[in-house]
Image: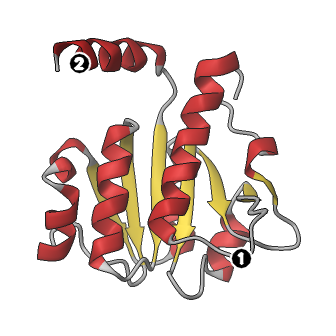
Amino acid sequence: MTEVKRLNRDWRRRSQARIGLLLDSVGQPFNVGAIVRTAAAFGVVQVWLCGGTAPPGHPSARKTALGTDRLLSFSRLPTAAAAASAAAADGYRVVAIELTSEAVPLHEAPLVGDVCLAVGNEDHGCSAALLAAADVVAYIPLPGRVGSLNVATAAAIGLAEVRRREWTDGTG
């Protein structure tokens, strides 16, 4: 375990950019808990909750998050537009992850500096208000025969890509 802790400290030192996360009506507590745990693992500092997002304190969310919710700051706002505005006011570029005709592949999205990734409802994705408020809309290319991912999986891929970009070339 000591070696793993040392490796993680090294990666933590390489992680200078702030990452935020916006959850737009993510209704299933299990998904919220999984996202919270992944967010804590990738060094997210702020999570904005809006719409019908299940509370991180829900018993199922807490069980899945394994106590990692204590490592994050949460803000609840009534709408996705308000949450995106709060993230932007705090200096984040808001990048919604959604499959739309205007979306760019995630690996081509501008992930420079402080980024707030936004994910949406399990069935309906990001709301129109969130997509309108986002600086960029990106999608995760899926070459297989499945057209979508679980929201917690999509959030994990997005968070990993933000850090990977920072670590590999420092430019996002």
Disc nearer the start of the sequence (1/2): 2
Residue 160 location, x and y as percent?
53, 41
- Can the viewer see residue 113? no
Residue holding disc 2: 5
Q: Assign a secondary structure to mark 1.
A: loop
- Apparent side of residue 153 relative to residue 53 in the rendered image (left or right): right
**Quarter of the image containing the N terminus?**
top left
Q: In which quarter of the view is residue 146 placed?
A: bottom right
Q: In which quarter of the view is residue 41 placed?
A: top left
Q: Nearer the viewer, residue 52 or 108?
A: 108
Q: Assign a secondary structure to mark 2.
A: helix
User: Residue drawn at (60%, 30%), measured in percent from left and top?
Assistant: 164
User: Residue drawn at (32%, 61%), measured in percent from left and top?
Assistant: 34
User: Residue drawn at (70%, 17%), measured in percent from left and top?
Assistant: 169
Q: Nearer the viewer, residue 121 or 10?
A: 10
Could you give the CA–CA distance between mark 1 and mark 2, rounded to whole angstroms?
A: 37 Å
Residue 31 location, x and y as percent?
36, 71
Q: Residue at the right extreme?
A: 101
User: Residue drawn at (22%, 58%), measured in percent from left and top?
Assistant: 65
Which class describes the residues within 10 Å of circle 2: few (<14), some (14-19), or many (20+)?
Answer: few
- Mark 1 belongs to which amino acid? Gly
- Apparent side of residue 141 relative to residue 165 in the rendered image (left or right): right
- Can the viewer see residue 49? yes
Q: Residue at the front extreme?
A: 145
- Apparent side of residue 84 relative to residue 41 in the rendered image (left or right): right
Which class describes the residues within 10 Å of circle 1: few (<14), some (14-19), or many (20+)?
Answer: few
Residue 147 — which label?
1
- The mark total stands at 2
Residue 100 location, x and y as percent?
80, 73
Against 50, residue 118 (above or below) is above
Q: In which quarter of the view is residue 120 placed?
A: bottom right
Q: Nearer the viewer, residue 142 or 29?
A: 142
